[in-house]
Amino acid sequence: MSLPPQRAELFYTGKAKQVFRTSDPDVYWIHFTDGATAFNGVKRATIRDKGEVNARISAHIFERVAAAGVPTHLLGAPSPVDHLVHRVDIIPVEVVVRNLAAGSICKRLGLEEGTALPRPMVEFFYKSDELNDPLITDEHALMFGWAEAWELAYLRHASLKVNQVLRAFWDELGVTLVDFKLEFGRAMARERRGQILLADEITPDGSRLWEKGTGRHLDKDVFRRDLGDLGDTYRELFARIFGEQLHGG
Ligand code: UDP
């Protein structure tokens, strides 16, 4: 039996995660930190337990998504705050799925927050911190070589499938899934080359989650909009999902 990949040098620091290489060139190690940022890094804080809650929620959801037939980058969790993942080349097209209108679409189109959409919708954004992730059409992605037509078709199809899985998951927990963001990557390993894998994370950092009945926000909008204590909110979400308090506390 071969040894599990060992963590090697840090090569990328994101807003809430660090990515390390490992002893296996086709495997990366993602460490979830307690960092929180909003408005493209303008607002920052450290939130106790956030890394662990996000890592554990994301691993749990990725397993469900994979079981539903959408392959993901996740290989395993060597600790409660770390994921081992397939090395991918991230497609610079972020996918947002919306069930209700909230956030940027309300500003852009003058909609009231919470407006029901007749069916789930998919939007593409160009992944660029300098440009603040602008909304794009397929034409832009094709024109500038960010993704091919079949890849965009796959991103749409897979994201709507993920939405079905997530809606049912959150629904059972008394939570409405308003919207969320996904990132995908192209697998780099020779034996998987070309395969598109769901990558990054699925967490309350990149989703809007409203408590049914009360409409209370159970996601990063608590931090963005100063609605309460983000750490308490995330620990509550953890307890809802796993049926136990984080650290038994
Ligand atoms: N989102 C994200 N990263 C981004 C932009 C958006 O994770 O860079 C998530 C956000 O948390 C929300 C969904 O994608 O769940 C839709 O975000 P929206 O376009 O409404 O933008 P926002 O209001 O966050 O600026």
Image (tube, grey):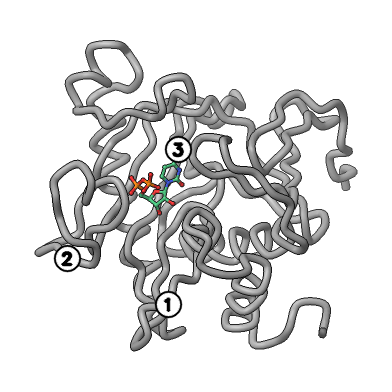
Instruction: Name the amino acid type tagged 2.
Output: Thr
- Closer to the chain start, of discs 3 and 1, is 3
CA separation in Å, label 1 and label 2: 16 Å
Q: Quadrant of residue 94?
A: top left
- Closer to the chain start, of discs 3 and 2, is 2
Q: Is residue 108 above or below residue 79?
A: above
Near mark 3 (Cα within 10 A), the count class, few <14, some 14-19 or many ≥20, is many
Instruction: Name the amino acid type tagged 1.
Output: Arg
Instruction: Name the residue tied to disc 1.
Output: 216
Q: Give the image location of residue 177, x and y in percent.
A: 36, 68
Instruction: Give the residue drawn at x 69%, y 41%.
Output: 17
Q: Give the image location of residue 157, x and y in percent.
A: 26, 47
Secondary structure state at the residue bearing disc 2: loop
Kindly give the residue lying farthest to the front in the view shown: 226
CA separation in Å, label 3 and label 2: 28 Å
Q: Give the image location of residue 235, x and y in percent.
A: 67, 74
Instruction: Give the residue drawn at x 90%, y 43%.
Output: 3
**Left or right of 117: which side holds 204?**
right
Instruction: Name the residue tied to disc 2.
Output: 115
**Left or right of 236: which side holds 72?**
left
Quadrant (top left/top right/bottom left/bottom right) for the C terminus: bottom right
**Which of pointers 3 and 2 indicates the residue nearer the eye?**
2
User: Would you say the beta carbon of the disc 1 residue lies within 8 angstroms of ligand 1?
Assistant: no
Instruction: Name the amino acid type tagged 3.
Output: Phe
Instruction: Give the residue drawn at x 72%, y 45%.
Output: 84
Q: Which mark is residue 184?
A: 3
Q: Which mark is residue 99?
A: none
